[in-house]
Image: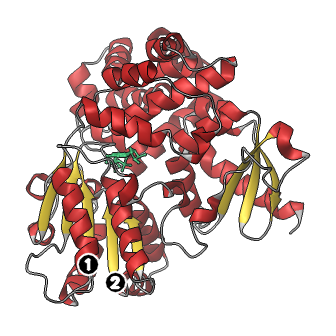
Amino acid sequence: MQTNDAQDLWETLRKGLANHLPERTFHDWIEPCRPLSFDGTTLLIQVPSPSARIWIEQQLAEEFHDVLVQCDLASLRLGFMVAGDAKTAPAPAKGRPAVTAPAETPLDSPFPQGFQRYTLDRFVVGPSSQLAFAAANAVVENHGRSNSTLNMNPLFIYGGSGLGKTHLMIGIGKGILAKSPGVKVAYLKVDNFFNELTIAIRAKNTEPMRKKYQQNDLLLLDDVQTLGRMERTQEEIFYILEYLLQYGKQIVITSDKPPQKLEGLHDRLITRCKWGLTADIQPPDFETRVAILRKKLEDEVFKDLPHVPEDVITFIAHKAKGSVRDLEGLLTRVVFQSSFLGVAPSLDVAQQAFMGQTGSEATASISMEKICRTTAETYGISFTDLMKKKSRHQSILLPRQVAMYLTRELTAASFTEIGRNFNDMHHSTVMNAIESVKNRMQKDADFHKLVHSLLNSIQ
Ligand SMILES: Nc1ncnc2c1ncn2[C@@H]1O[C@H](COP(=O)(O)OP(=O)(O)OP(=O)(O)O)[C@@H](O)[C@H]1O
């Protein structure tokens, strides 16, 4: 294919990422990337260094996926190549592959390509995830059997953010597809469904979309907690679930809360969610965290990097006690930092990564609360009004928009997470708020100065 294709695709992706990522993340990681080639399937992107490749592949996979879906490029595969290797590649050399191999994901795979590692055999099971893991395996095992005694439809998995719900869900999909390759599977994130539906509603044509999802044998519905305020989306999802359940098709749902605690959901939808089996996942204990880190280090991207010693693994497992995403994030930072500094991973490097001596780590430790309190103080309003008051008055609206912008700049929080923090605001409202701050900053020098001084004072 022509270089132009690669450039056009990259331009589309770049624009999407610019809207989706915090400005600083975009500037640090995306700006230095260059499109290399497009072979009709894979867009090959050059990254400036091995450490950048680690970061992009490990920390930004979900963001790339969301943008691909939003840009209607869900089937596009991405490969990342380190700058110096460009003369000898694209064919991966023996030993360390210079290009991310998307080979594990077949072209017509229903799963996002960033989720290659999400298989049941790569899920490390501990006491806190035993039930959910057993249920996931049982769903795979019993799929297609008519004589199953236990009703596991839908399987509803809930638990805090980053604890492995999506991993298990995709693992179920892959397990069922491995057993019965002809099965039709759809993976659906509620936010993406909302966007797709909005376009369909604008075109006054929602029927094809409903049909598209009703024809599946397995529906994986991710993050239903965001459904609360989406009246029309709820309605569409209800009809799809109802139809699939009626025809005995398997549904797997994930959420950060159990069905009965899902706010804003219609009773009939809650009832459907509770119909089958509900299983929770809690944060892993220390031994499981160590096992997860060891498993993670088996990933392709870590294979030819210097060995991470046992004391470093133990250190990370002690420090990152909450979500597995944070645990993996700290490991990535340690490996990234070692690679960046050209030294082997050690306790010193781990300590540095943890203490936040790099820009990205320092920002990660800033809490949303601190950002919001400082913003409220600067604007002379109360913290509670900033967070909760349902007011469209400029005196509340503007500081709130600024706080959202700062949160996006200074933390790794997604639009959805930011919205949750502000009285469960919808992610599209958050996106608009941030956009409006950016626009105003461009036009109004004083406002630009104020936001920047806030940014500096919080860091
Ligand atoms: N028990 C586990 N074993 C191995 N990897 C895990 C485990 N739990 C989580 N992970 C990894 O942690 C990361 C986050 O997991 P995942 O995206 O599934 O979380 P989640 O619960 O769906 O989060 P969210 O609610 O924010 O969407 C993934 O890289 C996943 O592979």
Residue 47, percent from left and from top: 74, 40
Q: Nearer the viewer, residue 126 or 80?
A: 126
Q: Nearer the viewer, residue 197 or 83?
A: 83
Q: Nearer the viewer, residue 370 or 380?
A: 370
- Provide the residue designation for mark 1: 250
x 50%, y 38%: residue: 297
Q: Would residue 231 be visible to someone looking at this image? A: no
x 71%, y 69%: residue: 41
Residue 355, percent from left and from top: 45, 12
Within the image, what quadrant is residue 345 found in? top right
- Provide the residue designation for mark 2: 217
Asked if the residues shown at circle 2 and circle 1 are in contact, with their CB atoms under 8 angstroms apart, the answer is: yes
In the rendered structure, the answer to whether residue 289 lies left or right of residue 20 reads left
In the rendered structure, the answer to whether residue 203 lies left or right of residue 43 reads left
Q: Would residue 215 be visible to someone looking at this image? A: yes
Within the image, what quadrant is residue 449 found in? top right
Q: Secondary structure at mark 1?
A: strand
First-in-chain label (2 vs 1): 2
Quadrant containing the N terminus is bottom right
x 49%, y 23%: residue: 309
Which label number is shown at residue 23? none
In the rendered structure, the answer to whether residue 155 lies left or right of residue 317 reads left
Q: Secondary structure at mark 2?
A: loop
Amino acid at dot 1: Gln
**Residue 27, placed above or below residue 319:** below
Amino acid at dot 2: Asp
Q: Is mark 2 within 8 Å of ligand 1?
A: no
**Residue 452, placed above or below residue 84:** above
C-alpha gap between disc 2 and disc 1:
6 Å
Residue 40, percent from left and from top: 76, 71
